[in-house]
Image (spheres, rainbow, N blue to C red):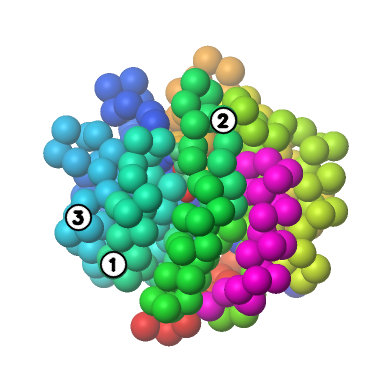
Amino acid sequence: MDVTLITVAATGAEAEKAAAPALPVTIEELVATAVECQRAGAAVIHVHIRDDAARPTLDVGRLKETVGALRSACDLIVQLSTGGAVTDSFDARLAVLDAEPDACSLTCGTVNFGDDVFANPWGFIKDLYQLTKERGVVPEFELFDFGHIATLHRLLREFGPPVGGHVHCDLVMGVPGGMAGDVATLAAAVAQLPESATWSATGIGRTTLPVMFSALAAGGHLRVGMEDTLTFSRGRPVTGNAELVQRAAEAASLAQRPAMSPAQAREFLAIPPR
Ligand code: KMH
Ligand code: ZN
């Protein structure tokens, strides 16, 4: 039977704890979220961490502690964000791999990000990609716009396949400044992906549901979580990441492609054993 990979993007770098009290910002909150989300059907956790004041940080010591705490508490694949916050330096974003995660995000181009710019020039992309290969970390290629797909093709052409040999992408749709989160855009993007690549999709804010249903209809996988949306339905704040994962798992089951387990996901994404 076909199965669906569900990734939970639990925290992100943008939402404020004061505005979203259910946002996991401490290691304890993140671990509790991870355990609940695994139970609800997630197989991967995409991780951003916060400092003691709940501000985004890429502190390597804290990242290492977080990776260790998640590994002890659950079986989820730990995917650290190398995107960080728009204010993070390229060096700090490369140093994320010092925390030895199973996987990491790798955004394939610069994109306007609301009023900010999320900078990913070619020089940084290729340095990060080469570092993933040196360190044995499986990258997930984050695609916010069509030019990012062209850059992914260039990356694979010039530097070969990733660790494990399997290319998995994530379409991040509906960011103000990136590609739209709708059926037609999703279909056009999927048509341009490298042959034999697999893909997930996530829709930011109010594009969450259209993107989720489009992705399932098109045979893709799902990313959900409070990094991407803070409302469950119009006017109703999310109570936690687990309810977003649970909804995604229910939709996947209705599509007759139920959620895959973390063990199945390790095989699917070709995560090397540690
Ligand atoms: N926080 C965004 C600027 C990633 O995690 O790799 C970038 C981001 C992408 O969230
Ligand atoms: Zn992220």
**Local secondary structure at mark 3:** helix
| The C terminus, quarter of image | bottom left
* Tag shown at residue 150: none
| Residue appearing at x 68%, y 41% in the figure | 145
Q: CA distance from mark 3 to mark 1?
A: 11 Å
Q: Which residue type does callout 2 highlight? A: Asn
| The N terminus, quarter of image | bottom right
Which of disc 3 and disc 2 is earlier in sequence?
A: 3
**Local secondary structure at mark 1:** helix
| Residue appearing at x 30%, y 60% in the figure | 95
* Tag shown at residue 62: 3
Residue 63: x percent and y percent?
A: 25, 57
**Local secondary structure at mark 2:** strand
Which of disc 1 and disc 2 is earlier in sequence?
A: 1
Which of disc 1 and disc 3 is earlier in sequence?
A: 3
Q: CA distance from mark 2 to mark 3?
A: 29 Å
Residue 231 higher or lower than 10, as above or below: above
Magenta residues (range):
142-163
Q: Magenta part mainly helix, strand or loop?
A: helix
Contact (Cβ within 8 Å) of mark 2 with mark 3: no
| Outermost residue to the top | 235
Q: Is residue 121 left or right of residue 191?
A: left
Residue 96: x percent and y percent?
A: 32, 59
* Tag shown at residue 98: 1
Contact (Cβ within 8 Å) of mark 2 with mark 1: no
| Outermost residue to the front | 123
**Residue topped by disc 2:** 112
| Residue appearing at x 49%, y 41% in the figure | 119
Q: Which residue type does callout 1 highlight? A: Asp
